[in-house]
């Protein structure tokens, strides 16, 4: 019954309100706060209402917020034709919401100025306290569910802080009469995140290891997310604020949380990469800690698989810079690799020479459906792409896809862990050992290959060895080689998932988005006459362009097909507008500032805005 309960509850009003109509009948779609809190089952049902907001997976129908592929396309990994999408340029007229929908700000990969979920968690905690004092629940039950509520409160504040920095912190439900609290200014992000840290410590100490069904929130799932959120804040404190004490504190907790998962014995790298994203069922996949189930029979489907089916357009395509970041199968960056043809940057050779995740992520030939001609088919199974150009069965077309979505998986946990440890080592902590690398990066690289990859001759990537760690000539000078390679591993692992924009923000590398590197604005090397002759047509005259190795741009004239060999230049491409470091944080709405002033209070605008 697990999946039916979760789906049913997701369409029920999530707020707590007394409600009656003219006949004084109890509402069938809202909860009556006066008589709802009667058993542990009441707590479980209430908690289910959080799942689609925080464990979004592929979202639903055509909705894109927080969805893989369809949502995470604003980063330095991707390029499109025309002008590249811009950062925000001025404070909005209004930026506030009280909605419980999983709405977000695309260019910040996080929520809008909305404290509805904070209030929801505080209300949840207060009702749990009341149930305990009324002897409705036992102490162990109280400890678990208060940990659940504190987890979601910490999750929400972590996301709000990642977008806005300083935010007002509330640890109780604010009444309409409490104007001083309701209209208080922002609290310092360090103060807020120390409160989040306390919540997360409580979670790891008190949440159940299992709550019956593995898909209910438990300590392992929570620990995976805590490793993510604490890694973000720990590295932010290091690179943006130079606060070593807080950086160490948060990174220590990130490593501790990840270690809970890694030492549990419950999870393993037993799946090939593609099966993590295109499978109809992830129930038996031991790498997946939490997943979202989709089922056409109960009307819960998505569209992410469709946009991976080779037919649907991907206007934002993977760029040359991303492709170059993929390590060769000898474990070395391509400029220092000894793999034959490692320096040939066409799709065919890159599939053959790179880490297996390249082949599992991208189609092995140019596709006009991608803005860069490199098409991502990561989020569909091997069968789905064989239907190109259609018609497609419902499971591969429109918004009726039913492949399950991994929400938290072991690869993220171990990469969070090894990065936290490597960062701590730069601040006086214990040095990373070969055993640490074997338990993380090398464990990922040892994943099995599926039959399709094997048939193509794809090879597993050689293990990373600290004693012979390659020094990438393209490495940023301010980043140690080990941390650079850990960051590379994340980039290969999480293409089109939740991480890239948040990663470059926390590393203080938003300058990557300025596209000063020409590779950001190019596709891979393409010989159009040999590989893609269907584009050598009159409609592409004066539009199709390639860039030669020496930087020369060649435009298709209709008679120079033989010369159309080079890095693909997306049509009419131009750089995004200049931006400054203020875009690390989002502004709040001018209307919200005015509302505070009207009440006699001050709400501070985000720095730089």
Image: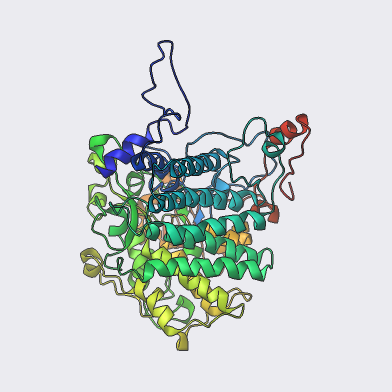
Whole-percent x, y for residue 84 in the image: 57, 49
Picture quarter with the N terminus: top left
In this view, the residue farthest toward the top is 22
**In the image: residue 67, left or right of residue 99:** left
Q: Is residue 90 above or below residue 521?
A: above
At which x and y percent is residue 466?
46, 85
Q: Residue at x 53, y 52 (%)?
A: 154
Along the line of sight, the residue nearer the viewer: 199 or 214: 199
Please state the horizontal and vertical placement of residue 479, each as a whole percent of the image. Answer: 59, 75
- Counting every numbered tag in the picture gives 0
On the question of residue 478 being in view, the answer is yes
Residue at image x 48%, y 27%? 17
Vertical comparison of 350 with 302: above or below? below
Q: Which residue is drawn at 70% across and 32% down?
A: 591
Q: Front-most of 185 and 27?
A: 27
Residue 289 lies in quadrant: bottom left
Question: Which color mode does the image show?
Answer: rainbow
The vertical placement of 570 against 118, above or below, is below
Q: Which residue is at the front of the view, 547 or 332?
A: 332
Q: In which quarter of the image is residue 596?
A: top right
Q: Which of 36 and 514 is in front in this view?
A: 36
Q: Looking at the image, is 300 positioned above or below residue 519?
A: above
Residue 68 in view of the camera? no
Answer left or right for 226 relative to 241.
left
Q: Where is residue 524 in the image (x, y as percent from the top left)?
A: 45, 62
């Amino acid at each position: 019954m697990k999946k039916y309960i979760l789906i049913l509850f997701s369409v029920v009003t999530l707020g707590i309100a007394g409600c009656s109509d003219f006949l004084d009948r109890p509402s069938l779609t809202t909860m009556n706060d006066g008589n709802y809190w009667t058993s542990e089952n009441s707590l479980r049902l209430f908690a289910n209402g959080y799942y689609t907001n925080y464990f979004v997976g592929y979202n639903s129908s055509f909705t894109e917020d927080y969805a893989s592929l369809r949502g995470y396309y604003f980063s330095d990994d991707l390029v499109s034709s025309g002008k590249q999408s811009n950062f925000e340029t001025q404070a909005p007229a209004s930026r506030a919401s009280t909605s419980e929908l999983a709405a977000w700000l695309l260019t910040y990969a996080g929520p809008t100025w909305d404290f509805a979920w904070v209030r929801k968690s505080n209300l949840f905690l207060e009702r749990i306290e009341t149930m305990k004092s009324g002897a409705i629940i036992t102490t162990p039950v109280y400890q678990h569910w208060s940990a659940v509520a504190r987890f979601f409160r910490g999750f929400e504040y972590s996301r709000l802080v990642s977008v806005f920095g300083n935010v007002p912190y509330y640890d109780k439900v604010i009444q309409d009469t409490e104007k001083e609290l309701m209209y208080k200014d922002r609290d310092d992000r360090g103060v807020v995140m120390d409160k989040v840290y306390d919540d997360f410590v409580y979670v790891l100490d008190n949440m159940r290891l299992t709550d019956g069904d593995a898909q209910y929130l438990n300590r392992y799932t929570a620990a995976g997310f805590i490793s993510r959120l604490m890694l973000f804040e720990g590295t932010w404190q290091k690179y943006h604020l130079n606060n070593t004490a807080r950086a160490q504190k948060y990174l220590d907790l990130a490593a501790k949380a990840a270690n809970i998962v890694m030492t549990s014995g419950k999870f393993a790298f037993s799946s090939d990469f593609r099966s993590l994203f295109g499978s109809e069922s992830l129930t038996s996949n031991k790498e997946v800690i939490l997943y979202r189930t989709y089922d056409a029979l109960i009307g819960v489907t998505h569209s992410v698989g469709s946009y991976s089916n080779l037919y649907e357009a991907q206007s934002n395509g993977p760029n040359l810079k991303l492709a170059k970041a993929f390590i060769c199968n000898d474990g070395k960056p391509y400029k220092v690799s000894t793999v034959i043809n490692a320096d040939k940057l066409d799709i065919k050779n890159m599939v053959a020479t790179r880490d297996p995740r390249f082949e599992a992520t991208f189609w092995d030939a140019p596709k006009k459906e991608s803005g860069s001609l490199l098409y991502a088919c990561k989020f569909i199974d091997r069968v789905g792409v064989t239907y190109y150009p259609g018609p497609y069965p419902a499971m591969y077309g429109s918004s009726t896809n039913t492949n399950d979505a991994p929400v938290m998986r072991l690869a993220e946990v171990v990469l969070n862990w090894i990065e936290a440890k490597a960062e701590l080592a730069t601040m006086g902590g214990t040095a990373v050992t070969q055993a640490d690398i074997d338990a993380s990066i090398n464990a990922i690289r040892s994943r099995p290959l599926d039959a399709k990859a094997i048939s193509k001759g794809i090879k597993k990537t050689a293990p990373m060895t600290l004693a012979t760690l390659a020094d990438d000539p393209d490495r940023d000078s301010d980043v140690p080689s080990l941390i650079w390679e850990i960051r590379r591993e994340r980039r290969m692992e999480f293409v089109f998932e939740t991480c890239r924009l948040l990663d470059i923000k926390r590393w203080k590398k938003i300058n990557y988005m300025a596209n000063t590197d020409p590779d950001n604005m190019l596709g891979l090397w393409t010989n159009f006459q040999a590989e893609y002759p269907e584009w050598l047509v009159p409609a592409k005259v004066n539009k199709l362009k390639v860039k030669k190795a020496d930087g020369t741009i060649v435009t298709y004239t209709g008679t120079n097909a033989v010369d159309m060999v080079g890095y693909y230049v997306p049509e009419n491409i131009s750089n995004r507008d200049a931006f400054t470091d203020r875009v690390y944080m989002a502004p709040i709405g001018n209307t919200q500032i005015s509302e505070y002033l009207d009440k006699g209070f001050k709400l501070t605008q985000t720095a730089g805005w």
